[in-house]
Amino acid sequence: MFANESSIAADVTVLDDPGNTITAVTVALGENPGGSLCGTTTTNVAGHVAHFTLGVDFGVLPPTCAGSLAGCTYTLTATAVGAVGDESEHFTITLVVST
């Protein structure tokens, strides 16, 4: 097992009903076989887009990943006051272990 951290970049496009002003978006890991987000998970919206650069701390990898994240899938959820939340498509994180 390895203790590792990786990073992801995500842009959340905010589509609001006319008259609603969405000022900030919060993201979290949805489907999550192991790990937690690090960094700023709530950010302001500019031009209907919220940009995130986050770390994912894997701590000790889950046994199902056995030293590799191949086959482990994640999703991101996005929520905002005054909007309906959504969840991303599944994605995998490629882990590079330096020795």
Image (tube, rainbow, N blue to C red):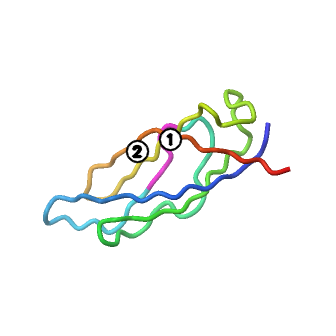
Q: Which residues are magenta?
A: 27-31
Which quadrant holds the N terminus? top right
Residue at (38, 58) in percent of width and height: 12
Which residue is situated farthest in the right direction here? 99
Residue 23's x, y, as percent? 32, 69
Mark 1: few, some, or many residues within 10 Å (few <14, many ≥20)?
few
Q: Are marks 2 and 1 in contact (CB under 8 Å)?
A: yes
Q: Which mark is residue 88?
A: 2
Q: Is residue 93 above or below residue 46?
A: above
Residue 8's x, y, as percent? 56, 55
Q: Is residue 35 above or below residue 65?
A: below
| Residue that label 1 marks | 91
Q: Is residue 34 above or below residue 98?
A: above
Magenta stretch: helix, strand or loop mostly: strand
Residue 65's x, y, as percent? 68, 31
Which residue is situated farthest in the left direction here? 18
